[in-house]
Image: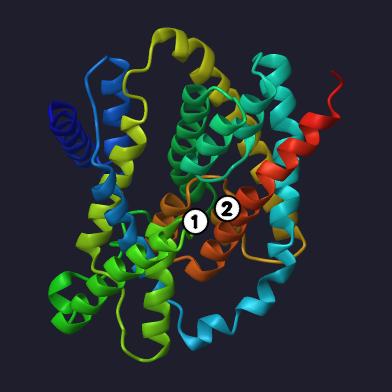
């Protein structure tokens, strides 16, 4: 109980500090920064897994509520950039695996599942089954998500002068109680049903699918209120920061340093793809960056909501990325592992 209380207090302090000094995205970056510093200082931190997942359902509802018939009509036009998602995954693997093996000294399973930009829990599970170092894989992915989330605001402001102070939605007082109730039903039922059938990313995709169906049927006309999106940001930020709880200085020197180097590689690869797509006129630059940045699906959805980007475009690419990694990673790992000389 003490680690959970400590995490809440630390995350709340991070929000307060970010507000006090007028830094961007206080509800997301404040908890991440404060919890990371507290973890490095050795403070006990913990989270409530069910509560963290329940907060992600808010983002699923938010995306589903934007999928109107006019938005769905734009999906076929996305194919030129969607086909580039597996290409980018292959490029990440071609650079990342040798980096972790030859420079960082990781064994193949640890290197491979540290490289693949999929969901954290899925990569840990696959890596454990393959004999990889679970703790190292966890820290590498936590670092990947954290660095991408921290770097994106500076890129969005510096390149597109994006306004990150926009409220992510309308106030709760302006949304009919009936629709708020329907959103809660979509969040809970969609999550539990998707989890029961084993859908990856169930806490986001389940509510997304159910809410989209209700929106298309004319039952919903609003997104979740700003207060709900802020709450989701808070718990997502706290969850990222607390993943470093119990980190040792040996892990800082080895795994955290390796993760930072990998993030530099990821950012360069992402910017290359974004620039190429933009120059070819396939998609706007800001949407492309949010769609191809290899961060977490939940975190990138938050950014899309705040800056007013094409949410459907961004989410479609991240769903494909995670889907491709989850389906392809175990098969590719077996193929590459067998091809190595014994």
Q: Using residue 231 as the reference point, say whether residue 256 is left or right of it.
A: right
**Residue at which label 2 appears:** 322
Q: Quadrant of residue 212?
A: bottom left
For the residues bearing labels 1 and 2, Cβ distance under 8 angstroms: yes
Q: Residue at x 65, y 52 (%)?
A: 327
Regarding residue 148, the answer to whether it shows in the image is: yes
The residue positioned farthest toward the bottom in the image shown? 218
> SS of the residue at dot 2?
helix
Q: Which residue is mark 1?
A: 200
Element under label 1? loop
Task: Tell me the quarter of the image containing the C terminus.
Answer: top right
3D distance between C-alphas at marks 1 and 2: 9 Å
- Bin the neighbour count of mark 2 within 10 Å (Cα to Cα): few under 14, some 14-19, many 20 and up: many
Q: Say if residue 63 shows up in the picture.
A: no
- Residue shown at 48% from the left, 65% from the top: 309
Viewer-side residue, 165 vs 129:
129
């Amino acid at each position: 109980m003490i680690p959970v209380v400590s995490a809440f207090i630390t995350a709340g302090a991070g929000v307060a500090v970010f507000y006090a000094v007028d830094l961007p995205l206080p509800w997301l970056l404040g908890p991440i920064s404060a919890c990371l510093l507290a973890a490095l200082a050795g403070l006990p931190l913990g989270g409530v897994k069910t509560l963290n997942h329940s907060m992600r359902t808010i983002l699923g509802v938010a995306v589903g509520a934007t999928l109107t018939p006019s938005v769905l009509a734009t999906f076929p036009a996305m194919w030129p950039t969607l086909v580039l998602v597996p290409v980018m995954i292959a490029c990440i693997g071609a650079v990342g695996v040798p980096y972790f093996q030859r420079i960082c000294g990781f064994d193949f399973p640890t290197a491979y599942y540290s490289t693949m930009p999929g969901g954290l829990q899925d990569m840990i599970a696959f890596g454990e089954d393959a004999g990889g170092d679970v703790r190292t894989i966890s820290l590498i992915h936590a670092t990947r998500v954290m660095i991408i989330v921290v770097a994106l605001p500076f890129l969005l402001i510096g390149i597109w002068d994006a306004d990150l102070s926009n409220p992510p939605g309308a106030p709760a007082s302006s949304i009919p109680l009936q629709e708020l109730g329907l959103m809660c039903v979509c969040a809970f039922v969609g999550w539990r049903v998707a989890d029961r059938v084993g859908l990856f990313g169930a806490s986001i995709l389940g509510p997304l699918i159910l809410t989209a169906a209700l929106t298309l049927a004319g039952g919903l006309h609003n997104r979740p209120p700003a207060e709900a999106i802020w709450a989701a940001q808070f718990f997502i930020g706290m969850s990222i920061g607390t993943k470093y709880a119990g980190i040792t200085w040996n892990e800082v020197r080895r795994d955290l340093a390796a993760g930072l180097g990998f993030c530099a590689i990821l950012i360069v690869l992402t910017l290359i793809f974004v620039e190429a797509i933009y120059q070819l006129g396939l998609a706007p630059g800001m949407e492309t960056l949010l769609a191809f940045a290899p961060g977490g699906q939940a975190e990138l959805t938050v950014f899309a909501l705040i800056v007013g980007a094409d949410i459907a475009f961004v989410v479609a690419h991240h769903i494909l990325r995670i889907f491709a990694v989850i389906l392809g990673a175990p098969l590719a790992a077996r193929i590459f592992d067998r091809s190595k000389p014994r």
